[in-house]
């Protein structure tokens, strides 16, 4: 039985085959591949794109989906996470998709569950399917990504999306530069830059990230507007650069990316959402069928 906790749970070859399958799923046609299967989603943190994407992916494959409302579940009455998981596991699901505010929870649960666990985001640790759909989107425009340059911009230290992308993009040989103020940068051997204009020079891809205010112990900027003055992706910054612009969402408009650039054809945010369903279909098929 295989789980997806980190992108390292799949080999490069497995990921390439996954992308081939995702390409087929872009037709958005319903399938019966997982007919008769049951998938449970447990989101202990709010989610719009990821939860909806997984549920649509499962239903397009013919699976039924049970979404646990944490606010109404027994966990709100004092039941432990492990007891909740054990009770759900006893119902015989074919996969459980979990998001939690604490890093490591999906990995711990995988030791107590008898079906595949898919990590839909755990704290600041990992978000593997987001990284997979990001790379899939990049490869739609750049077939051979080895050696291509990407700048990851924003609150990298607190971003599970950044962690998973760094892990996955390194595997595929991309040249990564981290662009952020010092307090948003993790300890790493990767290239770093504090200046946005300098950091995106000559890159092929820019990945903007949301400022993770909810994960900051103390207020770092006086306001998000102050942050935007230094790191917002604007028309002036992007100019006529031949780049792909990504963002995992939700986008803080005029903080991460300005309104004008959100409508720019170089911005692939909505394509990422579309691709996310296809990639998650491929992940569910691989782990369940």
Image (cartoon, grey):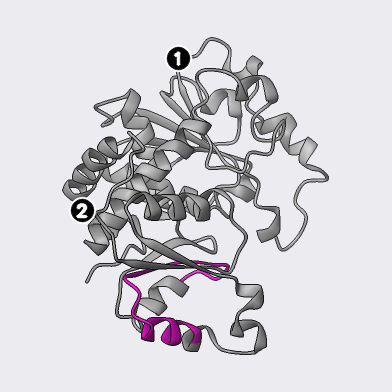
Q: Position of residue 144 (x, y in %)?
A: 24, 27
Relative height, residue 240 to residue 208 (above, below): above
Q: Residue furthest left?
A: 13
- Dot 2 falls on a residue whose secondary structure is loop
Q: Which mark is residue 242?
A: 1
Residue toward you, 224 or 113: 113
Residue toward you, 257 or 163: 257
Q: Position of residue 96 (x, y in %)?
A: 40, 69
Identify the residue under disc 2. Answer: 11
Relative height, residue 113 to residue 4 (above, below): below
Q: Which residues are magenta?
A: 84-104
Residue toward you, 205 or 59: 59
Sequence-wise first label, 2 or 1: 2
Q: Is residue 273 visible?
A: yes
- Dot 1 falls on a residue whose secondary structure is loop
| Disc 1 crowd, CA 10 A, few/some/many (<14, 14-19, 20+) | few
Q: Which mark is residue 32?
A: none
Q: How many marks?
A: 2
| Disc 2 crowd, CA 10 A, few/some/many (<14, 14-19, 20+) | few
Figure quadrant of the N terminus:
bottom left
Q: Is residue 102 magenta?
A: yes
At 31% from the left and 24% from the top, the residue drawn is: 142
Q: Is residue 23 magenta?
A: no
Relative height, residue 53 to residue 37 (above, below): above
At 51% from the left and 32% from the top, the residue drawn is: 270
Relative height, residue 93 to residue 80 (above, below): above
Question: Are circles 2 and 1 on residues that touch, CB within 8 Å?
Answer: no
Q: Position of residue 221 (x, y in %)?
A: 77, 46
Label 2, label 1: how far apart the Cα atoms are: 31 Å
Quarter location, residue 205: top left
Q: Residue furthest right?
A: 222
């Amino acid at each position: 039985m295989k789980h997806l906790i980190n992108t390292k749970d799949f080999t490069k070859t497995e990921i390439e085959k996954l992308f081939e399958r995702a390409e087929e799923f872009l037709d958005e046609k319903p399938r019966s591949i997982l007919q008769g299967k049951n998938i449970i989603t447990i989101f202990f943190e709010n989610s719009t794109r990821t939860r909806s994407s997984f549920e649509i992916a499962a239903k397009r494959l013919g699976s039924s989906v049970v979404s646990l409302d944490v606010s109404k579940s027994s966990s709100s009455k004092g039941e432990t996470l492990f007891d909740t998981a054990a009770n759900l596991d006893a119902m015989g699901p074919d996969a459980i998709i979990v998001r939690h505010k604490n890093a490591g929870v999906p990995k711990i649960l995988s030791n107590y569950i008898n079906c595949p666990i898919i990590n839909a985001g755990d704290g600041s640790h990992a978000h593997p399917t987001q990284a997979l759909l990001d790379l899939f989107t990049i490869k739609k425009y750049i077939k051979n990504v080895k050696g291509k340059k990407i700048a990851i911009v924003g609150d990298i230290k607190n971003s599970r999306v950044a962690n998973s992308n760094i892990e996955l993009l390194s595997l595929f040989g991309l040249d990564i530069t981290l662009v952020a103020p010092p307090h948003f940068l993790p300890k790493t051997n990767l290239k770093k830059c504090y200046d946005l204009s300098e950091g995106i020079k000559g890159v092929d891809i820019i990945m903007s990230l949301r400022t993770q205010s909810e994960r900051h112990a103390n207020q770092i900027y006086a306001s998000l507007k102050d942050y935007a003055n230094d790191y917002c992706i604007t028309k002036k910054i992007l100019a006529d650069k031949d780049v792909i612009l990504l963002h995992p969402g939700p986008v803080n408009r005029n903080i991460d990316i300005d309104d004008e650039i959100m409508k720019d054809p170089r911005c692939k945010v909505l394509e990422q959402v579309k691709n996310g369903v296809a990639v998650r279909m491929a992940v569910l098929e691989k782990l369940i069928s």
